[in-house]
Amino acid sequence: MTDISPLDQARILSEALPHMQQYDEETIVIKYGGHAMGDEETAKNFARDIVLLEQTAINPVVVHGGGPQIATMLKRLGIQSEFAAGLRITDAATIEIVEMVLAGSVNKQIVGYINEAGGKAVGLSGKDGNMVKASKTTRTIIDPGSNIEKAIDLGFVGDPEKVDLTLLNQLIGYELIPVLAPLATSKEGQTLNVNADTFAGAVAGALKAKRLLLLTDVPGVLDKSKKLIPQLSVKDARKLIADGTISGGMIPKVETCIYALEQGVEGVVIIDGKMQHAVLLELFTNQGTGTLIHK
Protein backbone atom coordinates (compact mmCIF):
# COMPACT_ATOMS: atom_id res chain seq x y z
CA MET A 1 0.00 0.00 0.00
CA THR A 2 1.29 3.47 -0.83
CA ASP A 3 2.03 5.66 2.18
CA ILE A 4 -0.62 8.32 2.56
CA SER A 5 0.23 11.47 4.49
CA PRO A 6 -1.79 12.09 7.67
CA LEU A 7 -3.32 15.14 5.96
CA ASP A 8 -4.54 13.03 3.03
CA GLN A 9 -5.96 10.47 5.44
CA ALA A 10 -7.87 13.22 7.23
CA ARG A 11 -9.12 14.60 3.91
CA ILE A 12 -10.36 11.13 2.84
CA LEU A 13 -12.23 10.74 6.12
CA SER A 14 -13.72 14.21 5.77
CA GLU A 15 -14.92 13.48 2.22
CA ALA A 16 -16.77 10.41 3.52
CA LEU A 17 -18.96 12.57 5.82
CA PRO A 18 -21.85 13.34 3.42
CA HIS A 19 -22.02 9.65 2.50
CA MET A 20 -22.08 8.63 6.14
CA GLN A 21 -24.89 11.12 6.78
CA GLN A 22 -26.88 9.71 3.88
CA TYR A 23 -26.83 6.25 5.48
CA ASP A 24 -27.06 7.37 9.12
CA GLU A 25 -29.19 4.91 11.14
CA GLU A 26 -30.19 3.20 7.87
CA THR A 27 -30.17 -0.55 7.31
CA ILE A 28 -27.93 -1.99 4.61
CA VAL A 29 -28.21 -5.64 3.62
CA ILE A 30 -25.02 -7.12 2.20
CA LYS A 31 -25.07 -10.44 0.35
CA TYR A 32 -21.66 -12.03 0.60
CA GLY A 33 -21.26 -14.85 -1.91
CA GLY A 34 -19.41 -18.12 -1.45
CA HIS A 35 -17.10 -17.08 -4.30
CA ALA A 36 -16.66 -13.51 -3.06
CA MET A 37 -15.29 -14.87 0.24
CA GLY A 38 -12.08 -15.92 -1.49
CA ASP A 39 -9.10 -16.25 0.80
CA GLU A 40 -8.80 -15.49 4.50
CA GLU A 41 -7.30 -12.04 3.88
CA THR A 42 -10.30 -10.98 1.73
CA ALA A 43 -12.75 -12.32 4.32
CA LYS A 44 -10.98 -10.47 7.14
CA ASN A 45 -10.98 -7.21 5.15
CA PHE A 46 -14.70 -7.67 4.49
CA ALA A 47 -15.31 -8.20 8.23
CA ARG A 48 -13.39 -5.01 9.11
CA ASP A 49 -15.47 -3.03 6.59
CA ILE A 50 -18.70 -4.36 8.14
CA VAL A 51 -17.50 -3.33 11.63
CA LEU A 52 -16.61 0.12 10.25
CA LEU A 53 -20.18 0.50 8.92
CA GLU A 54 -21.57 -0.37 12.33
CA GLN A 55 -19.22 2.14 13.99
CA THR A 56 -20.54 4.90 11.71
CA ALA A 57 -24.15 4.34 12.87
CA ILE A 58 -25.15 2.23 9.86
CA ASN A 59 -27.00 -1.04 10.53
CA PRO A 60 -25.42 -3.78 8.42
CA VAL A 61 -27.14 -7.14 7.95
CA VAL A 62 -25.00 -9.81 6.27
CA VAL A 63 -26.49 -12.69 4.24
CA HIS A 64 -23.98 -15.25 3.02
CA GLY A 65 -23.91 -18.08 0.51
CA GLY A 66 -21.58 -21.04 0.52
CA GLY A 67 -21.88 -22.92 -2.78
CA PRO A 68 -18.17 -23.77 -3.15
CA GLN A 69 -17.92 -24.84 0.51
CA ILE A 70 -21.00 -27.10 0.17
CA ALA A 71 -19.58 -28.70 -2.99
CA THR A 72 -16.27 -29.38 -1.21
CA MET A 73 -17.99 -31.02 1.77
CA LEU A 74 -20.29 -33.17 -0.40
CA LYS A 75 -17.25 -34.37 -2.31
CA ARG A 76 -15.39 -35.10 0.92
CA LEU A 77 -18.30 -37.19 2.17
CA GLY A 78 -18.76 -38.92 -1.19
CA ILE A 79 -22.33 -37.65 -1.70
CA GLN A 80 -23.18 -37.43 -5.40
CA SER A 81 -25.45 -34.59 -6.48
CA GLU A 82 -27.98 -34.99 -9.25
CA PHE A 83 -28.59 -32.01 -11.50
CA ALA A 84 -31.63 -31.12 -13.58
CA ALA A 85 -31.66 -28.15 -15.96
CA GLY A 86 -28.37 -27.02 -14.36
CA LEU A 87 -29.88 -26.92 -10.87
CA ARG A 88 -28.70 -29.12 -8.03
CA ILE A 89 -31.39 -31.47 -6.72
CA THR A 90 -31.17 -31.31 -2.94
CA ASP A 91 -32.17 -34.65 -1.43
CA ALA A 92 -32.43 -35.52 2.29
CA ALA A 93 -28.71 -36.41 2.59
CA THR A 94 -27.68 -33.21 0.79
CA ILE A 95 -29.85 -30.80 2.82
CA GLU A 96 -28.29 -32.15 6.00
CA ILE A 97 -24.83 -31.22 4.69
CA VAL A 98 -26.09 -27.89 3.29
CA GLU A 99 -27.41 -26.95 6.73
CA MET A 100 -24.24 -28.11 8.44
CA VAL A 101 -22.02 -26.04 6.13
CA LEU A 102 -24.19 -22.90 5.82
CA ALA A 103 -25.55 -22.52 9.36
CA GLY A 104 -22.44 -24.14 10.86
CA SER A 105 -18.95 -23.66 9.50
CA VAL A 106 -19.43 -20.81 6.99
CA ASN A 107 -21.75 -18.79 9.24
CA LYS A 108 -19.55 -19.07 12.31
CA GLN A 109 -16.40 -18.31 10.33
CA ILE A 110 -17.86 -14.94 9.21
CA VAL A 111 -19.14 -14.28 12.75
CA GLY A 112 -15.63 -15.02 14.05
CA TYR A 113 -13.95 -12.63 11.62
CA ILE A 114 -16.40 -9.79 12.44
CA ASN A 115 -15.94 -10.32 16.18
CA GLU A 116 -12.16 -10.47 15.78
CA ALA A 117 -12.36 -7.05 14.05
CA GLY A 118 -14.18 -5.65 17.10
CA GLY A 119 -17.82 -6.14 16.11
CA LYS A 120 -20.57 -8.14 17.82
CA ALA A 121 -21.89 -10.50 15.17
CA VAL A 122 -24.77 -12.91 15.78
CA GLY A 123 -24.97 -15.93 13.48
CA LEU A 124 -28.50 -17.03 12.56
CA SER A 125 -30.40 -18.75 9.78
CA GLY A 126 -33.85 -18.01 8.40
CA LYS A 127 -35.15 -20.81 10.63
CA ASP A 128 -34.39 -18.85 13.81
CA GLY A 129 -37.40 -17.06 15.24
CA ASN A 130 -39.40 -18.22 12.20
CA MET A 131 -37.62 -15.43 10.33
CA VAL A 132 -38.11 -16.79 6.81
CA LYS A 133 -40.88 -19.14 5.73
CA ALA A 134 -40.46 -20.64 2.27
CA SER A 135 -42.36 -22.84 -0.15
CA LYS A 136 -40.78 -25.58 -2.23
CA THR A 137 -39.33 -24.38 -5.52
CA THR A 138 -40.59 -26.04 -8.65
CA ARG A 139 -39.02 -25.50 -12.02
CA THR A 140 -40.33 -26.58 -15.38
CA ILE A 141 -38.14 -27.77 -18.23
CA ILE A 142 -38.99 -28.56 -21.84
CA ASP A 143 -38.29 -32.23 -22.47
CA PRO A 144 -36.11 -32.21 -25.64
CA GLY A 145 -37.51 -35.55 -26.87
CA SER A 146 -41.23 -34.83 -26.68
CA ASN A 147 -41.13 -31.00 -26.46
CA ILE A 148 -43.53 -31.29 -23.50
CA GLU A 149 -43.07 -29.01 -20.51
CA LYS A 150 -42.56 -31.01 -17.33
CA ALA A 151 -42.06 -29.99 -13.70
CA ILE A 152 -38.88 -31.01 -11.92
CA ASP A 153 -38.74 -31.48 -8.17
CA LEU A 154 -35.57 -29.83 -6.85
CA GLY A 155 -35.99 -31.47 -3.46
CA PHE A 156 -35.38 -29.37 -0.35
CA VAL A 157 -35.05 -26.04 -2.16
CA GLY A 158 -37.34 -23.12 -1.42
CA ASP A 159 -38.49 -19.65 -2.41
CA PRO A 160 -39.07 -17.15 0.43
CA GLU A 161 -42.74 -16.46 1.07
CA LYS A 162 -42.89 -14.57 4.33
CA VAL A 163 -40.30 -12.72 6.43
CA ASP A 164 -40.98 -12.19 10.13
CA LEU A 165 -38.86 -9.33 11.48
CA THR A 166 -39.44 -9.97 15.21
CA LEU A 167 -35.96 -11.36 15.80
CA LEU A 168 -34.06 -8.96 13.51
CA ASN A 169 -35.77 -5.98 15.14
CA GLN A 170 -34.35 -7.12 18.50
CA LEU A 171 -30.83 -6.95 17.04
CA ILE A 172 -30.72 -4.11 14.53
CA GLY A 173 -29.72 -0.79 16.11
CA TYR A 174 -28.31 -2.43 19.24
CA GLU A 175 -24.70 -2.72 18.05
CA LEU A 176 -25.33 -6.32 17.02
CA ILE A 177 -24.58 -7.44 13.46
CA PRO A 178 -26.87 -10.23 12.17
CA VAL A 179 -25.11 -12.76 9.91
CA LEU A 180 -27.75 -14.88 8.16
CA ALA A 181 -27.46 -18.30 6.52
CA PRO A 182 -30.03 -18.69 3.70
CA LEU A 183 -32.06 -21.56 5.17
CA ALA A 184 -35.79 -21.40 5.77
CA THR A 185 -38.62 -23.56 7.05
CA SER A 186 -41.60 -24.76 5.02
CA LYS A 187 -45.17 -24.82 6.33
CA GLU A 188 -44.61 -28.52 7.05
CA GLY A 189 -41.53 -27.69 9.14
CA GLN A 190 -39.00 -28.94 6.59
CA THR A 191 -35.64 -27.21 6.20
CA LEU A 192 -35.30 -25.63 2.76
CA ASN A 193 -32.19 -24.24 1.10
CA VAL A 194 -32.87 -20.81 -0.43
CA ASN A 195 -30.73 -19.12 -3.08
CA ALA A 196 -28.69 -16.56 -1.11
CA ASP A 197 -29.43 -13.66 -3.51
CA THR A 198 -33.17 -14.35 -3.30
CA PHE A 199 -32.97 -14.69 0.49
CA ALA A 200 -31.08 -11.37 0.79
CA GLY A 201 -33.66 -9.70 -1.49
CA ALA A 202 -36.56 -10.93 0.65
CA VAL A 203 -34.90 -9.83 3.92
CA ALA A 204 -33.88 -6.43 2.48
CA GLY A 205 -37.43 -5.92 1.17
CA ALA A 206 -39.01 -6.75 4.52
CA LEU A 207 -36.57 -4.41 6.31
CA LYS A 208 -37.18 -1.66 3.69
CA ALA A 209 -33.38 -1.39 3.57
CA LYS A 210 -31.76 1.74 2.15
CA ARG A 211 -29.40 -0.45 0.09
CA LEU A 212 -28.98 -4.09 -0.85
CA LEU A 213 -25.42 -4.85 -1.95
CA LEU A 214 -24.92 -8.10 -3.87
CA LEU A 215 -21.24 -8.99 -3.72
CA THR A 216 -20.48 -11.33 -6.61
CA ASP A 217 -17.48 -12.41 -8.66
CA VAL A 218 -18.22 -10.02 -11.55
CA PRO A 219 -17.84 -6.21 -11.69
CA GLY A 220 -21.59 -5.64 -12.19
CA VAL A 221 -23.97 -5.62 -15.16
CA LEU A 222 -22.11 -5.34 -18.48
CA ASP A 223 -23.40 -3.98 -21.78
CA LYS A 224 -23.07 -5.70 -25.17
CA SER A 225 -19.44 -4.53 -25.51
CA LYS A 226 -18.63 -5.86 -22.01
CA LYS A 227 -18.43 -2.39 -20.45
CA LEU A 228 -19.80 -1.82 -16.94
CA ILE A 229 -23.21 -0.13 -16.77
CA PRO A 230 -23.03 2.19 -13.70
CA GLN A 231 -26.81 2.74 -13.30
CA LEU A 232 -30.01 1.11 -14.47
CA SER A 233 -33.69 1.71 -13.82
CA VAL A 234 -35.98 -1.29 -13.43
CA LYS A 235 -37.41 -0.50 -16.89
CA ASP A 236 -33.91 -0.49 -18.46
CA ALA A 237 -33.02 -3.73 -16.67
CA ARG A 238 -36.14 -5.48 -18.04
CA LYS A 239 -35.25 -4.27 -21.56
CA LEU A 240 -31.71 -5.65 -21.25
CA ILE A 241 -33.03 -9.03 -20.11
CA ALA A 242 -35.48 -9.08 -23.03
CA ASP A 243 -32.83 -8.25 -25.65
CA GLY A 244 -30.31 -10.75 -24.23
CA THR A 245 -27.72 -8.22 -22.97
CA ILE A 246 -28.28 -9.56 -19.46
CA SER A 247 -27.99 -13.33 -19.75
CA GLY A 248 -27.14 -16.53 -17.90
CA GLY A 249 -26.59 -16.31 -14.15
CA MET A 250 -26.97 -12.51 -14.20
CA ILE A 251 -30.72 -12.83 -15.00
CA PRO A 252 -31.77 -14.26 -11.59
CA LYS A 253 -29.50 -11.70 -9.87
CA VAL A 254 -31.13 -8.78 -11.66
CA GLU A 255 -34.61 -10.28 -11.09
CA THR A 256 -33.78 -10.39 -7.35
CA CYS A 257 -32.81 -6.70 -7.55
CA ILE A 258 -36.13 -5.82 -9.22
CA TYR A 259 -38.07 -7.84 -6.63
CA ALA A 260 -36.24 -6.11 -3.73
CA LEU A 261 -36.96 -2.66 -5.21
CA GLU A 262 -40.63 -3.56 -5.58
CA GLN A 263 -40.66 -4.59 -1.90
CA GLY A 264 -39.40 -1.14 -0.85
CA VAL A 265 -35.58 -1.25 -0.98
CA GLU A 266 -34.30 2.12 -2.19
CA GLY A 267 -31.40 0.90 -4.33
CA VAL A 268 -29.64 -2.36 -5.15
CA VAL A 269 -26.00 -2.57 -6.21
CA ILE A 270 -24.27 -5.51 -7.89
CA ILE A 271 -20.54 -5.27 -7.14
CA ASP A 272 -17.39 -7.35 -7.37
CA GLY A 273 -16.79 -8.71 -3.89
CA LYS A 274 -13.22 -9.67 -4.72
CA MET A 275 -12.29 -6.02 -5.04
CA GLN A 276 -10.65 -4.73 -1.87
CA HIS A 277 -13.01 -2.66 0.30
CA ALA A 278 -15.80 -2.94 -2.29
CA VAL A 279 -18.43 -2.11 0.35
CA LEU A 280 -16.67 1.07 1.51
CA LEU A 281 -15.97 2.21 -2.05
CA GLU A 282 -19.65 1.82 -2.87
CA LEU A 283 -21.07 3.52 0.22
CA PHE A 284 -18.49 6.12 1.26
CA THR A 285 -16.99 7.48 -1.97
CA ASN A 286 -18.32 9.34 -5.01
CA GLN A 287 -16.84 6.68 -7.22
CA GLY A 288 -19.27 3.83 -6.57
CA THR A 289 -18.11 0.60 -8.10
CA GLY A 290 -20.72 -1.74 -9.51
CA THR A 291 -24.14 -1.33 -11.13
CA LEU A 292 -26.82 0.53 -9.16
CA ILE A 293 -30.36 -0.56 -10.00
CA HIS A 294 -33.13 1.79 -8.88
CA LYS A 295 -36.87 2.25 -9.49
Image (cartoon, rainbow, N blue to C red):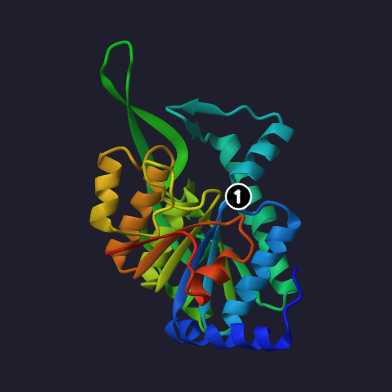
What residue lies at 70% left-to-right and 29% top-to-bottom? 78
* Residue 278 higher or lower than 3, as above or below: above
- The image quarter in which residue 242 lies: top left
Please state, as top left, top right, bottom left or bottom right, where the N terminus lies in the image.
bottom right
> Is 67 on the left or on the right of 232, as rendered?
right
Please state, as top left, top right, bottom left or bottom right, where the C terminus lies in the image.
bottom left
What residue lies at 42% left-to-right and 64% top-to-bottom? 203
* Residue 10 higher or lower than 254, as above or below: below
Number of callouts: 1
> Is 110 on the left or on the right of 218, as rendered?
right
Residue 167 in sight from this viewpoint: no
Say which of 129 and 204 sits in front. 204
Say which of 23 and 272 sits in front. 272
Position of residue 213 measured from the top left corner of the image (x, y, whole percent): 47, 63
Q: Which residue is mark 1?
A: 34
Which residue occupies the extreme top position in the image? 145
Position of residue 140 measured from the top left corner of the image (x, y, whole percent): 32, 30
> Is 132 on the left or on the right of 11, as rendered?
left
Position of residue 282 measured from the top left corner of the image (x, y, whole percent): 50, 68
Mark 1 is surrounded, within 10 Å at the Cα level, by few (under 14), some (14 to 19) or many (20 or more) other residues, namely: many
Say which of 240 and 115 sits in front. 240
Position of residue 275 measured from the top left corner of the image (x, y, whole percent): 61, 58
Residue 19 in sight from this viewpoint: yes
Classify mark 1: helix, strand or loop: loop
Which amino acid lies under the numbered mark 1 shown in the image of this protein? Gly
- The image quarter in which residue 279 lies: bottom right
